[in-house]
Amino acid sequence: MTYQGVLTKMETEFSSPIQYYLVFENDFLNMNQLLDKTLIIQFVKYQCLNCGMDKPIYRQGFCKSCFFEIPQAADWIMHPELSTAHLGQEDRDLEYEKAVQLKPHIVYLANSSNVKVGVTRKTQVPTRWIDQGAHEAIEIVEVPNRYLAGITEVALKAHVADKTNWRKMLKNDIDDENLVEWRERLSDYIPAEAKDYFIQNNTETHLDFPVNQYPEKPKSLNIKKDLEYTGKLVGIKGQYLIFEDDTVFNVRANEGLVVNIAID
């Protein structure tokens, strides 16, 4: 059976193990059910997630012109400390920015390849942790807007990592950490504006990924270059499909690509 559609990040369901769904316009695949099956992935064309045109994807699933125009790709997305909606100041679209930035946000610690600090909207917990391949995570502060979360992240990343080593995460080369102790140690570095939002009494969330075999030397599939790939699916972690030959495919990094997926 063959499915065709434009790639967007896999949707997830928090369970044990986590359930993954690849959603196309008129169909979807429960990827957990495809473990130990052979998949054939073929690149078909581009389809910008904003304008829908067949133009090379620049970043985040958008073509270059859309990326530099639409509010969904503005700098404050990746750098929340640049948020200005709380001041009533527009970047690209104030109504959109208010709708996203003026919502409760969480600053968290996640252990994927190492302990790192991150920011997400409250409604994206635990989805954000799943997408990062974290096997444990904990909230540090809950603030009323994105700006406060951003300045807190900036302050904390002087004392803890803010990036994930994707190879180490996929190899499952990780140590369990006491994130409650990490939270307490880092509490001294929370900016004054966010001190009152510190979460004092909570516990770690643990995540269980559907992986039968971890890659020893993960190598990333570039489907735009290779055009077609065939492999046996043996695991899913973060937004990566893991294949038996150590090939890994980052679905989120390939948003905006139209592909055929055949199940052998």
Image (cartoon, helix red, strand yellow):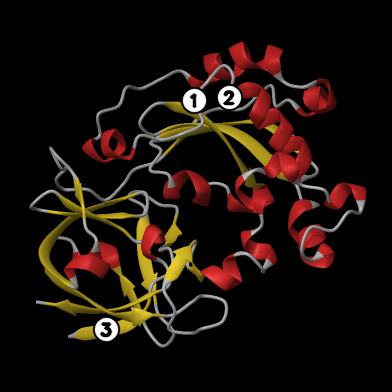
Q: Secondary structure at mark 1?
A: loop
Graded by Cα atoms within 10 Å as few (under 14), some (14 to 19) or many (20 or more), the crowding at tag 1 reads some
Residue occupying the point 68% across, 43% down: 80
The picture places residue 69, in percent across and down from the top left corner, at 67, 68
* Residue bearing the label numbered 2: 157
Front-lying residue, 256 or 138: 256
Q: For this view, does 215 lie left or right of residue 131? A: left
Residue 50: quadrant of the picture: bottom right
Q: Determine the secondary structure under disc 2.
A: loop
**Amino acid type at image mark 1:** Ala
Q: Position of residue 91 (x, y in %)?
A: 79, 58
Q: Position of residue 20 (x, y in %)?
A: 36, 61
- Compute the Cα span from label 2 to label 1: 6 Å
Instruction: Give the amino acid type for the residue marked by disc 3 in the picture.
Output: Tyr
At a point 21% along the width and 58% down the height, the residue shown is 221
State yes or no: discs 3 and 2 in contact (Cβ < 8 Å). Answer: no
Nearer-the-camera pick, 165 or 141? 165
Residue pointed to by mark 1: 161
Which mark, residue 3? Answer: 3
Mark 3–mark 2 Cα distance, whole angstroms, equals: 42 Å
- The local crowd at label 2, few if under 14, some if 14 to 19, many if 20 or more residues have their Cα within 10 Å, is some
